[in-house]
């Protein structure tokens, strides 16, 4: 999967490292040599370009049109807003934007420019993980995430049994099913539309559920 990241933010390095380690092609763009140097000092297989992040032609040259996912997480809201519009113009399947100004965030969402806006006053890593993997984090410890997955969002899980999900993807703690909100732990239960899946997943397993959702 091709992932273009605008902004060499140190805080999200663990996520970038895991994405690169699991075979995704990562390109990072930043106009700051200082921020970029943090990533160039690491021994991970990513491409890093120091250039103007709102230069459309430059972004096209480093792979914007081929991106499956664009993460606009630059320190500047203006940069992230503009990159979001560039990506939408090219019909990039998944666009995630980090923003602090509430007005800009509303504009992005109301215009349908981006699927997810992460507020800068939130924990950036947590918000980025939720947006990338289409999950809600309930809790996290040193090694694992306890997450909530909505089958309305992750429709590819509909029709699978709990047992199949456990075998192929991740450990299912329980399924909250139906309007009556029954708690189901039967491995033969078939996931239906509207079911909420509570799962325990390790950091290394998380990339198994990375996908594109337009």
Image (spheres, grey):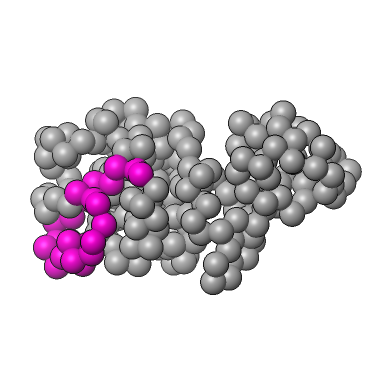
The picture places residue 125, in percent across and down from the top left corner, at 44, 62
Is 152 left or right of 14, judged from the image as shown? right
The residue depicted at 48 percent of the width and 43 percent of the height is: 210
Is 124 left or right of 134, judged from the image as shown? left
The picture places residue 68, in percent across and down from the top left corner, at 35, 35
The residue closer to the viewer here, 108 or 75, is 75
Magenta-span inclusion, residue 184? no
Is 207 left or right of 165, judged from the image as shown? left
Q: Which residues are magenta?
A: 23-47
The tally of labels here is 0
User: Residue pushed farthest front?
Assistant: 167
Q: Is residue 35 above or below residue 133?
A: below
The residue depicted at 18 percent of the width and 66 percent of the height is: 41
What is the quadrant of the N terminus in the image? top left
Residue 110 seen in the figure: no
Magenta-span inclusion, residue 39? yes
Is 212 left or right of 71, judged from the image as shown? right
Q: Quadrant of residue 102?
A: bottom left
The residue depicted at 49 percent of the width and 56 percent of the height is: 204
The residue depicted at 13 percent of the width and 35 percent of the height is: 61
């Amino acid at each position: 999967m091709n992932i273009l990241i605008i902004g060499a933010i140190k805080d999200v390095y663990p996520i970038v490292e895991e994405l690169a380690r699991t075979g995704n092609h990562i390109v990072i763009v930043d106009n700051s040599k200082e921020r970029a140097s943090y990533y160039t000092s690491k021994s991970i297989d990513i491409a890093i370009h120091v250039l103007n992040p709102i230069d459309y032609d430059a972004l096209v040259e480093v792979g914007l049109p081929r991106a499956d996912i664009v993460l606009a997480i630059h320190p500047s809201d203006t940069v992230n807003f503009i990159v979001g519009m560039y990506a939408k113009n090219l019909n990039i399947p998944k666009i995630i934007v980090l923003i602090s100004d509430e007005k800009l965030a509303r504009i992005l969402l109301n215009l349908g420019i981006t699927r997810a806006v992460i507020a800068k006053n939130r924990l950036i890593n947590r918000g980025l993980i939720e947006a990338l993997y289409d999950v809600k984090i309930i809790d996290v410890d040193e090694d694992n995430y306890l997450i909530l997955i909505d089958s309305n969002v992750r429709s590819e899980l509909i029709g699978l049994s709990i047992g199949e999900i456990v075998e192929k993807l991740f450990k299912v703690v329980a399924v909250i099913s139906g309007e009556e909100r029954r708690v189901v732990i039967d491995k033969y239960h078939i996931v239906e539309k509207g079911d909420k899946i509570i799962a325990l997943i390790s950091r290394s397993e998380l990339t198994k559920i990375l996908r594109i959702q337009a």
